[in-house]
Image: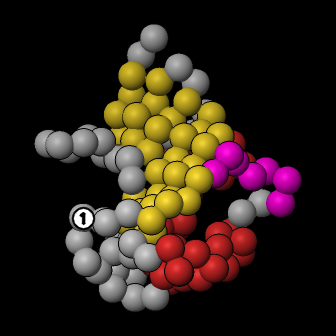
C-alpha cells in the first residue's frame, strides 16, 4: 500500500493518506488566531475542508474527530461554528477535551480521520 503525504514539512505532514483513510494533523487557526473561539473554529473548519479535498475526501466522510480547547468553558462557542458547518446525519465520532495548546493565541485545535 502506498502512503501519500500532503504538505510534508520538516517535522510533520498536513495530512497522510494510507489504506483508504486520511489522517489530518492537528489544525489550528491561521487567519483567526487570537480571535474568538467561534471565529477560530470557523477558520479551522475551512482549512479542514481544503485539506480533505486535497486528499480526495470531504467532511461527510469523517470518521473520528478530536477537538482540543484551551478552555472547556468555550465548548458552546466552538459548537456554534461546528453546528453551522457539519452535515446533519453525516456526523463523525467525536471527543472534546481541555488541553494546553502550543501557543497562547490558539484556543482550538482539531484533528480529523476520514475515509477517502
> Position of 100 compared to 65: left or right?
left
Residue farthest left in this picture: 10
Instruction: Give the prevailing secondary structure in the magenta stretch.
Output: loop
Which of the pair 50/15 is nearer the observer?
A: 15
Crowd rating for badge 1 (residues with CA inside 10 Å; few <14, some 14–19, many 20+) = few
Which of the pair 36/95 is nearer the observer?
A: 95
- Which of the 4 image quarters holds residue 102? bottom left
- Please tell me whether residue 23 belongs to the stretch shown in magenta: no
Q: Position of residue 65 (x, y in %)?
A: 57, 50
Q: Determine whether 79 is above or below 23 in the image.
A: below
Residue located 52% across and 52% down the image: 66
- Please tell me whether residue 91 belongs to the stretch shown in magenta: yes
Q: Position of residue 110 (x, y in %)?
A: 47, 58
Q: Which residue is mark 1?
A: 102
Q: Determine whether 68 is above or below 36 in the image.
A: above
Can you see residue 62? Answer: no
Q: Position of residue 37 (x, y in %)?
A: 48, 81
The magenta stretch spans which residues? 88-94
Residue farthest bottom in this picture: 35
Residue located 31% across and 66% down the image: 100
Residue located 55% across and 59% down the image: 96
Secondary-structure class at tag 1: loop
Quarter containing the N terminus: top left
Amino acid at each position: 500500500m502506498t502512503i501519500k503525504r500532503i504538505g510534508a514539512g520538516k517535522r510533520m505532514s498536513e495530512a497522510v493518506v494510507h489504506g483508504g483513510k486520511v489522517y489530518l494533523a492537528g489544525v489550528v487557526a491561521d487567519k483567526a488566531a487570537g480571535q474568538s473561539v467561534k471565529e477560530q473554529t470557523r477558520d479551522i473548519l475551512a482549512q479542514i475542508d481544503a485539506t480533505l479535498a486535497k486528499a480526495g475526501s470531504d467532511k461527510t466522510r469523517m470518521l473520528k474527530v478530536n477537538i482540543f480547547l484551551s478552555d472547556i468553558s468555550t465548548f458552546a462557542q466552538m459548537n456554534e461554528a461546528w453546528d453551522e458547518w457539519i452535515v446533519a446525519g453525516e456526523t463523525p465520532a467525536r471527543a472534546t477535551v481541555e488541553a494546553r495548546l502550543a501557543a497562547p493565541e490558539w484556543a482550538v485545535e482539531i484533528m480529523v480521520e476520514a475515509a477517502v
